[in-house]
Image (cartoon, helix red, strand yellow):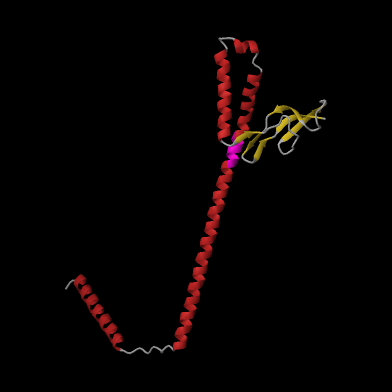
């Protein structure tokens, strides 16, 4: 017999002995102490308490997650508003420049046939730009003839104007704008003394 065959025989005999020993253990009676009814009820109560504790924990975690989700949604919305506000604030000087350009075009240039398309084109660009900003919620702050309101206006100087109430805005130096309910630029104005 080869060593390999001899080894296999030993393994088979060992397996048979192990199975026989397991069968003998199965035949023996193992004494398990009988649980009393009160022990079982106590165990059930303890498990019910544990289940309730776990349910409460799951509910608390779900509520925390919902609060976290809502907070992140608010932060994202606020971030979007801040980005829009900053972008609009950066674009306002361009609108001011277009307005000043239109105000300072000489009358004779406006009447020249060669310059008329240019003047009309600049005015169209200004109107479209203003319309775009309005579509995003940007509005001009009314100033002329109004009483100075520091929430919307910034007085840069005062002048004597006969027959005008004090703190009445008589000239607008720079247009102010709001975005929704927020002032993104105060109107710079000149008021009567």
First to last magenta residue range:
81-87
Asked if the stretch drawn in magenta spans residue 82, the answer is yes
Split into 4 quadrants, where in the image is the N terminus? bottom left
Q: In this view, does 152 lie above or below 5?
A: above
Camera-nearest residue between 129 and 39: 129
Camera-nearest residue between 101 and 169: 169
Camera-nearest residue between 55 and 171: 171
Q: Which residue is drawn at 58% across and 32% down?
A: 133
Camera-nearest residue between 190 and 57: 190
Picture coordinates of residue 144 (x, y %)?
Answer: 72, 29
Q: Is residue 69 above or below residue 54?
A: above
Determine whether, in the image, residue 23 is placed left or right of residue 172.
left
Q: Is residue 49 above or below residue 90?
A: below
Q: Which image quarter: residue 193?
A: top right
Q: In this view, does 75 lie above or below 5?
A: above
Q: Residue at x 58, y 24 (%)?
A: 126
Q: Which residue is drawn at 70% across and 34% down?
A: 186
Q: Which residue is drawn at 56% across and 15% down?
A: 118
Picture coordinates of residue 148 (x, y %)?
Answer: 76, 35
Asked if the stretch drawn in magenta spans residue 55, the answer is no
Picture coordinates of residue 155 (x, y %)?
Answer: 76, 32
- How many numbered marks are there? 0
Magenta span main SS: helix
């Amino acid at each position: 017999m080869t060593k390999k065959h001899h080894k296999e025989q030993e393994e088979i005999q060992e397996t048979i002995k192990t199975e026989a020993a397991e069968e003998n253990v199965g035949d023996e009676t193992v004494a398990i102490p009988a649980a009393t009814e009160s022990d079982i009820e106590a165990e059930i109560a303890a498990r019910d308490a544990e289940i309730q504790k776990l349910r409460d924990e799951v509910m608390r975690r779900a509520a925390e997650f919902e609060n976290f989700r809502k907070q992140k949604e608010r932060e994202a919305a606020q971030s979007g508003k801040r980005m829009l506000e900053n972008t609009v604030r950066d674009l306002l000087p361009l609108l001011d420049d277009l307005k000043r350009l239109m105000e300072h075009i000489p009358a004779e240039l406006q009447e020249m046939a060669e310059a008329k398309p240019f003047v009309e084109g600049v005015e169209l660009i200004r109107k479209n730009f203003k319309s775009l900003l309005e579509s995003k919620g940007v509005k001009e702050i009314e100033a002329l003839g109004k009483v100075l309101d520091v929430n919307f206006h910034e007085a840069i100087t005062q002048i004597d104007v006969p027959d005008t109430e004090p703190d009445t805005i008589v000239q607008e130096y720079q247009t102010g704008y709001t975005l929704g309910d927020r002032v993104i630029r105060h109107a710079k104005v000149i008021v009567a003394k």
